[in-house]
Image: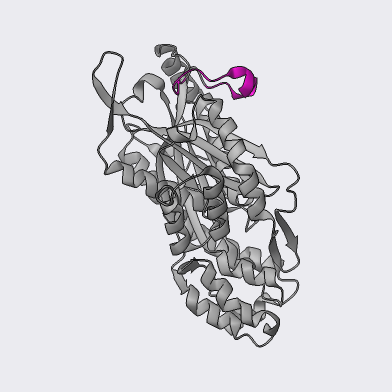
Amino acid sequence: MNAKTTQKAQELTSSLSIVQPTRIKSEPNFDELGADRLPSKRFLPIIESIATGTPHHIIRQSDAAKFVANLPDLEQNQSRIEKLYSNTRIETRHLAVNLLSHETIAFSRQQGTLQTRMELYKQYAVPLAEQVVSQAVASARAASEVANLKDAIGLIVFVSSTGFVAPGVDAELIKRLGLRRDIARVTVNFMGCAAAMNGLRVACDHVRANPTHKALVVCLELSSVNAVFEDEINDVIIHSIFGDGCAAVVVGACAEEQTIGQGKVVIRDHLSYLIEDTEDGITLGIRDNGITCQLSRQLPNYIEAGVNSVIERFLASHHLTKADIDLWAVHPGGTRIIEKAQHSLGLNDSQVADSWEVLRQYGNMLSSSVLFVMERMLLKQESLPAKPESSESGNLTAKAVTGLAFSFSPGVGIEGLLFQKV
């Protein structure tokens, strides 16, 4: 931070009155939360915009099933493949690399291709990230009072589990979009489908500490560059569910009294819990021919057994119950992931409809997937009339819409965030 920015921050913070900690029905139990979980007394992190995008190449799931089932050396699982693809409930996926070509299949089976795959990752990732981030910045600028929003971005968090390059995509975005050269940079790698939640936690901490700043979170996953076709059922499963996508979020900070009735999306708290004895549930690795993902057959059972108790305890720390949650942004990781989470939490079909729709259109895009779900939910909220509720004075006021988003990390970990549209 330069001297002028520091002076402006000091002037801003000194001119604001101190506000009480955020209330969600009543004060959180700080003994349960721990000292490191105390909410900010001055500023609240807010989501100023979410933008999403995908590669232009689209494959239909039915075409992919027929293509893979007819590969000459997959006879061992051939009879299972078309049924397996049909059971995913995925209709289309957007991919950077066309996996339905014999040239791609031949390349995927070569050894020693890791460097080439990472070069492909950067080649496809940079233009997609530039497109999506530009949309997110433009949306945030339209709703912000900041004259030059790009100059206000003091942190960029780049999230991915499907590619590793340095200098990376974040460095290219700084150059292409003209972001500040003294911007702070953080990468979140190998946290799998839950990594967006980790990135948002870092962004929230930054804007609380630097309330004149914005933070930019970019989640970009290109599973197609790591595709491997061998006669193993795990490879077939991985190929059948994963798609490519990118999501970008601009996070800012706002004094609490300035959020009321403004339609702002406030991030209230973050959830993180590593479920006991689930280490084999999701494992990521690196081989000489790409990044690998192994999903245990027990993963759906781990989710069904672990999700409800973890989330109930988290909500109880805010004096909330599941009945208080209006929006459930469940990670669309696959049919059994959604089904088991829904069953564990006792949710009805309409409460997880957006998760099913994202899965149907895109497949599992790892970290970016849950942000596609949140974007759909928040866009719907913009077109709905505010829910009225009675205030202490008896007057009707707009009711805050409360949401919970969560995904799963290797381990198995549950990572999430509690948010409100106020």
Instruction: Give the total of numbered labels.
Output: 0
> In terms of depth relative to the viewer, which is nearer, 337 or 219?
337
- The percent position of residue 229, horizontal first and vertical second, equals 67, 75
Please tell me whether residue 239 belongs to the stretch shown in magenta: no
Query: Any magenta on residue 29?
Result: yes
Question: In the rendered image, is residue 190 in sight?
Answer: no
Question: Could you say which is closer to the camera, residue 68 or residue 328?
Answer: 328
Q: Residue at x 32, y 31 (%)?
A: 145
Q: Quadrant of residue 185?
A: top right
Where are the magenta residues, as a range? Answer: 22-39
- Quadrant in the rendering for residue 205: top right
311 horizontally vs 378: left or right: right
| Quadrant (top left/top right/bottom left/bottom right) for the C terminus | top left
x and y, in percent, of residue 164 in the image = 65, 56
Can residue 421 be seen from the camera position used here?
A: yes
Point out residue 339 in the picture as x, y percentages from the top left corner.
53, 54
**Does 61 sit above or below residue 31?**
below
- Residue 285 lies, in percent from the top left, at 73, 58
Residue at the image position 74 percent from the left and 53 percent from the top: 280
Question: In the image, what residue occupies the spot 71% across and 82% down?
Answer: 76
Color theme of the render: one colour
Q: Residue at x 65, y 63 (%)?
A: 118
The relative height of residue 343 versus residue 205 in the rendered view (above or below) is below
Of 309 and 359, the residue lying toward us: 309
Q: Main secondary structure of the magenta part?
A: loop
